[in-house]
Amino acid sequence: MKKKTFLTSLFNLVAILFLLYLFFVAIEMLGHSFKLIGKDTAKNLIHSATHSPIIGLLVGTLATAIIQSSSTTTSMVVALVAGGAIDITHAIPVIMGANIGTTITNLIVSTVHIRANKEFERAFAAAVVHDIFNILSVIILLPLQVYFNILGRVASFLEKLFEGIGGIKVSSPIKIITKPVVHFIVDIVNKNGYITAIISFILLIVALTFLVKVIKRVIVGRAQVFFSEVMFKNAAYSLLLGLILTSIVQSSSVTTSLIVPIAAAGILTLEQVFPYTLGANIGTTITAILASLATGNPAAITVAFSHLSFNVLGITILYPFKRLPIFLARTFAKISIKFKLFPILYILVVFFIIPAIIFYIWR
């Protein structure tokens, strides 16, 4: 009996590890496919960010939604600032927009659960709460930035504080372990972004479908108690976990997407997920800060710190009113159950249609 229990546990562990790896490959491939399709478009968009703060914000959102990576958008902005193509004042709204655009990945991941109502409701709420928080942060902080340059001032202060201390360049362990498989598949399809996207969606559906089933079977009893009452014991634990994981993985898209199937399985509540996503917001800025410190370029360092300042100030201002984003996330999730096209329309309208229309009209 003990041998059978051991073998079952071992099988479940191997299954979870394999499915997680498949999930990471799918996420990396999804980002890779969008880069193949639209990286040049994103570069051209960012070059247009000098028209106004609103245009900069929309450019950051649209560019990041196209290439599915706030890190790539931030890197482009840092390079443009360092090269004198745009100034720091115009760069900051793009960084704020990138914070919104990066949430598209976990929203896409949540749609995999669309066939199971309860699962989908929990998954979509866990995904969209991140998006809602970032949008609310922009609504509050963009006017303060435009009129008082609040993020620029804080970032400049931090740049002077850390000037000359140097930094380190770190590699993402997720990218290291998935890179061979992702590049192998991309090369097989002759670097066709559209075929790569289709394959990544198929892998994502397979990985998440089975991952939720295995998680439901394994994380019960004591395991569920440990997961819920130790790792996500309170808001501080959840925030710290999101921060540390994202700093290690170097991708908020991966860490926030990872939490979606766990929430879909009913293991975690939205109240536990919310601070975790806030920690991921901070964690995603660490790599860029370390890399910018290594360059020693004051402009690059300031832009990197403006991203951190935006996230920390947003949390400081909005966390006391956490019931609002949580309420809105639950409301949107309930709507998505009654109207199954709502999540798709939400993604298209918020991340592509509105930014594109306003961008071309305003410009």
Image (spheres, rainbow, N blue to C red):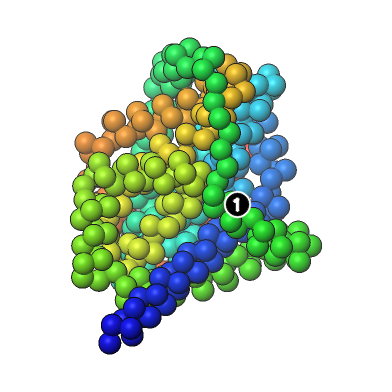
Instruction: Examine the rendered structure and indicate whether residue 135 appears above or below residue 106.
Output: above
Quadrant in the picture for residue 143: top left
Q: Pick the residue in front: 223 or 45.
A: 223
Looking at the rendering, in which quadrant would you find the N terminus? bottom left
Name the residue type under label 1.
Ile
Q: Pick the residue in front: 1 or 276.
A: 1
Q: Residue at x 59, y 24 (%)?
A: 294
Residue picked out by circle 1 = 176
Quadrant in the picture for residue 63: top right
- Check the image and name the residue furthest to the right: 190
Q: Residue at x 21, y 67 (%)?
A: 222
Q: Residue at x 26, y 66 (%)?
A: 223
- Say whether residue 335 is visible: no
Q: Position of residue 27 (x, y in %)?
A: 55, 58
Q: Position of residue 152 (x, y in %)?
A: 47, 18
Q: Position of residue 293 (x, y in %)?
A: 55, 23
Instruction: Examine the rendered structure and indicate whether residue 8 appears above or below residue 237.
Output: below
